[in-house]
Amino acid sequence: MATRPSKQLETFANPRPGRDYHIAFECPEFTCLCPMTGQPDFATILIEYVPDQLCVELKSLKLYLWSYRDEGAFHEAVTNRICDDLVAAIAPRTITVTGKFRVRGGISTTVTVIHAT
């Protein structure tokens, strides 16, 4: 597996597809660029999902999140895209992706995206 940023999300078979259980990730080092100013935005990305047939592999998730480092993205757009990409990769029963963006210009932003089948 590569150690460069990548939009490729790797998966593996859910070891207990007959049981609902929650998987939660906290990624406190997420960065992207403000599309208006080009300045960096820093966030904690929280992902919680109930898997169906597939789970996301952690190193690929790290490289996926890293791939946003040099991209301009509004907070709302990037949080929704992360959710959409995870849904496309693993088709979870439910997923919630929250972006907690740090203060810039005196305002912090929290965006929560919920997808349920």
Image (cartoon, rainbow, N blue to C red):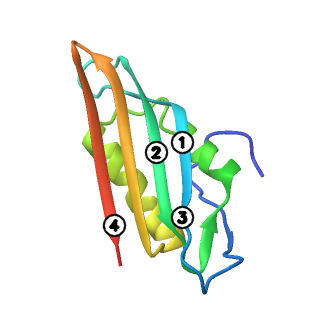
Marks 1/4 in contact by CB < 8 Å: the verdict is no
Measuring 48% from the left and 74% from the top, which residue is drawn there? 91
Marks 3/4 in contact by CB < 8 Å: the verdict is no
Name the residue that disc number 4 marks.
115
The extreme bottom residue here reads 18
Mark before the other along the chain sequence, 3 or 4: 3
Name the residue that disc number 1 marks.
26
Name the residue that disc number 3 marks.
22
Answer with left or right where residue 2 lies relative to residue 70: right
Q: Secondary structure at mark 2?
A: strand
Q: CA distance from mark 3 to mark 1?
A: 13 Å
Name the residue that disc number 2 marks.
46
Residue 62 position by quadrant:
top right
Mark before the other along the chain sequence, 2 or 3: 3
Mark before the other along the chain sequence, 2 or 1: 1
Q: CA distance from mark 2 to mark 3?
A: 13 Å
- Amino acid type at image mark 4: His
Q: CA distance from mark 1 to mark 4?
A: 18 Å
Mark 3 crowd level (few <14, some 14–19, many ≥20, 10 Å Cα): few
The mark closer to the camera, 2 or 3, is: 3
Mark 4 crowd level (few <14, some 14–19, many ≥20, 10 Å Cα): some
The residue nearer to you, when weighing 81 against 16, is 16
Mark before the other along the chain sequence, 1 or 4: 1
Q: CA distance from mark 3 to mark 4?
A: 14 Å
- Amino acid type at image mark 2: Leu
Q: Is residue 48 above or below residue 17?
A: above
Q: Is residue 94 above or below residue 23?
A: below
Q: Where's residue 12, x and y in %?
A: 70, 70
The mark closer to the camera, 3 or 1, is: 3
- Amino acid type at image mark 3: His
Marks 2/1 in contact by CB < 8 Å: the verdict is yes
